[in-house]
Amino acid sequence: MIGQNGVSCEFLAVSEKPPPPVVLTIAGSDNSAGAGAQADLKTFMALGAYGLTAITCVVAEVPGKVSAIHPVPAPVVAEQIRLCLSAFPVAAVKTGLLYSTEIVETVCDILAGTTMPLVVDPVMAATSGAPLLRPEALEIYRRRLFQRATVVTPNLDEAALLAGRRVHSLDDMREAGPGLVADYGSAWLLKGGHLGGDQAIDLLFHADGKVSEFGSARVHGVSTHGTGCTTSAAIAAGLAHGLDLEAAVAQAKRFVTAAIRHHYRWEGIHALNHRA
């Protein structure tokens, strides 16, 4: 139906709906779109949020291989973030690959004066094992960014490095989590996706000492990348919708499990299905 001004009434009805919550991802660009900012945007859309990006670096990669990383100058990263925060009612932020000391410092400087939930995915290496974070940048995470986080979401290798101890089992996760909370004052989600067994179990260590467990049946025979990016993005989307942290993590766990179970498959390549 066309109204008097020539605009479709159906379009007007849709446009008058309240806009979705806005989430900003500060992350690298993955040209294969399975991880990084591209995966974040897919996740935000699937979970009913509007995604913004501040790109920190351009990564040339496909599942199983990283061939090049080119950082974006820190002032350009800063301007992307500032424009997003000034123009949109950003309800949550997540960080992914920040790459360098200068970029980590820039992100910390800008977010220091904000209060929205912050999900920090401390991306240090690709699933293939390729290093993605400059070693000297880790100190800025420890000194500034982790304290600002609502939740930090390391994989087991990252958790081991940050905790200064081995994290190779569920018992190791239970022992490492409280120390990370005590060191940084934020909540920590330790993800057991790389452990063996028929259950994939994640543990959320709340800042108040509570521990929540999230389990799902492990999907065997799938080799994807981007599960960590997708998990942190899904948590940020949940927080932007007003969920508490435990509910946001539970939603993220269900979403990632479905994305793995219903993955896409081409010859030699697997990819998460963010529409699952």
Image (cartoon, rainbow, N blue to C red):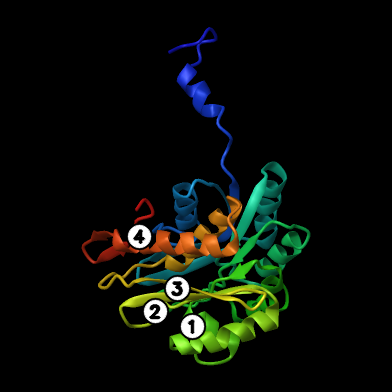
Q: Please tell me whether mark 3 or mark 4 is closer to you in this view.
A: 4
20 displayed left or right of 84: left
Q: Which of labels 3 and 1 is toward the front?
A: 1
The amino acid pointed to by label 4 is: Ala
Mark 3 or mark 4: name the one nearer the start of the chain.
Answer: 3
90 in relation to 183, above or below = above
Residue indicated by mark 1: 157
Crowd tier of the residue under label 1, counting other residues whose Cα lies within 10 Å: few below 14, some 14–19, many 20 or above:
some
Residue placed at 66% from the left, 59% from the top? Answer: 117
Choose top left, top right, bottom left or bottom right for residue 267: bottom left
Return the mark for residue 126.
3
Q: Which residue is mark 4?
A: 258
Residue 102: % across, % down = 69, 69
The mark that comes first in sequence, 2 or 4, is 2
Tell which residue pokes out farthest to the left in this image: 267
The tag earlier along the polypeptide, 2 or 1, is 1
Q: CA distance from mark 3 to mark 2?
A: 14 Å
Residue at 54%, 54% in the rendered image = 237
Camera-side residue of 268 and 237: 237
Pointer 2 residue? 194
Are the residues tagged 2 and 4 within 8 Å (C-beta)? no
Q: Label 4's element? A: helix
Spatial CA distance of label 4 from label 1 is 24 Å
